[in-house]
Amino acid sequence: MAHAHLDDVKTYLLDLQDRLCEALAAEDGRAGFREDTWQREQGGGGRSRVIEEGAIFEKGGVNFSHVYGATLPPSATAARPELVGRGFHAVGVSWVMHPHNPHVPTSHGNVRFLIAEKAGEPPVWWFGGGYDLTPFYPVHEDVQHWHRVARDACAPFGDNVYPRYKAWCDDYFYLKHRDETRGVGGLFFDDLNEGGFARCFAFQQAVGDSFLDAYLPIVRRRRDTPYGERERDFQLYRRGRYVEFNLVWDRGTLFGLQSGGRTESILMSMPPLARWTYDWQPEPGSPEARLYDHYLRPRDWLGETPQETP
């Protein structure tokens, strides 16, 4: 039964990768995704797809992987010592899009499924995933739209699901060393196995299937907004925070590297260009300061009006 579940999830994830790539390439209009398939020596492999130097997307990737092995890596067992010594199968799709225009937010998402097995004991399985938005020049209506789509995707599964996973996202995508959120959040969930496989799988699909509805309308609104060197410099500076989070705090990066995944695919999420400026501070009252003053902290976006967030 466990591997029947795995096959069902894998079929969905491969289709999701296809649909995301097709829609994002169509939106870009100039560049397409190139594909690499890879094999993992210890077991499994993946299908990596990357878009570069498009009309909208400077770089992006949508990766599928299915890896398995005799023992879970330390990143997966640190908080769950009962899983030490179990073999595993992990399947997932992860994606990140880095646009050219600083007015178009960067966005990231992933959905994943893991089964941990041990002879003589029932398998342990769980789902995880979510998506988050990282704007540089945020617009309140965009942030509300993003969270509205996330809330609506969660609604069939209970009134408490969106608030719970929205708060988890705010907590997870937090740069402790900077005392700021990476962006304006979204959804994050992990270790999901409550209510049976069918319900959990349906929730994973609701999250994966809602991403394009959340992201593409924002891309369309902002893709033609004029910008200059100032905005580009700020975008590159803030991309540095994205790199810091992925290399210092992200559990998925750690799991991928510790499990012997393909490094090029794991680090696909990195922006093509970023910069670090020593002790840079935004000018008070500037558009750049607005990001820091009003957006890089957890907020109840759907309970506020645009007037409350200048």
Image: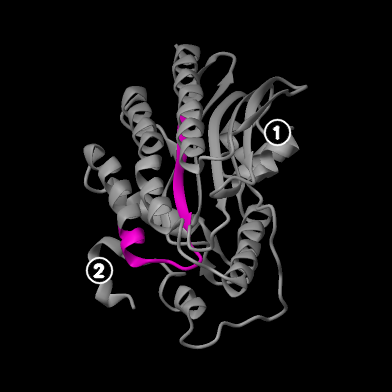
Quarter-of-image position of residue 94: top right
- Type of amino acid at the residue the image marks with label 1: Ser
- Does residue 77 appear in the picture of this structure? no
Q: Between 50 and 239, which is closer to the camera in this rendering?
A: 50
Q: Quadrant of the C terminus?
A: bottom left
Q: Amino acid at mark 2?
A: Glu
Q: Is residue 236 visible?
A: yes
5 left or right of 62 in image: left
- Kindly identify which numbered label has been placed on residue 259: 1
Mark 1 residue crowding within 10 angstroms, few (<14) / some (14–19) / many (20+):
many
Disc with the residue nearer the chain's start (1 vs 2): 1
- In the picture, the disc for residue 304 is 2
Residue 310 in the magenta stretch? The answer is no
Q: CA distance from mark 1 to mark 2?
A: 42 Å
Which mark, residue 186? none
Spot occupied by residue 220 in the image (x, y as percentages of width and height): 40, 51
Q: Position of residue 33 (x, y in %)?
A: 60, 33
Range covered by the magenta-colored residues = 126-144
- Taking 225 as reference, is 48 above or below it? above
Residue 53 % position (x, y): 64, 46
**Viewer-closest of 111 and 73:** 111
x, y percent for residue 177: 62, 69
In the rendered view, does 57 fall on the left or right side of 2? right
Q: How is the image coloured?
A: one colour
**Residue, x 21% and y 47% (percent of image)?**
159
The quadrant of the picture occupied by the N terminus is top left
Pick the front one: 265 or 220: 220
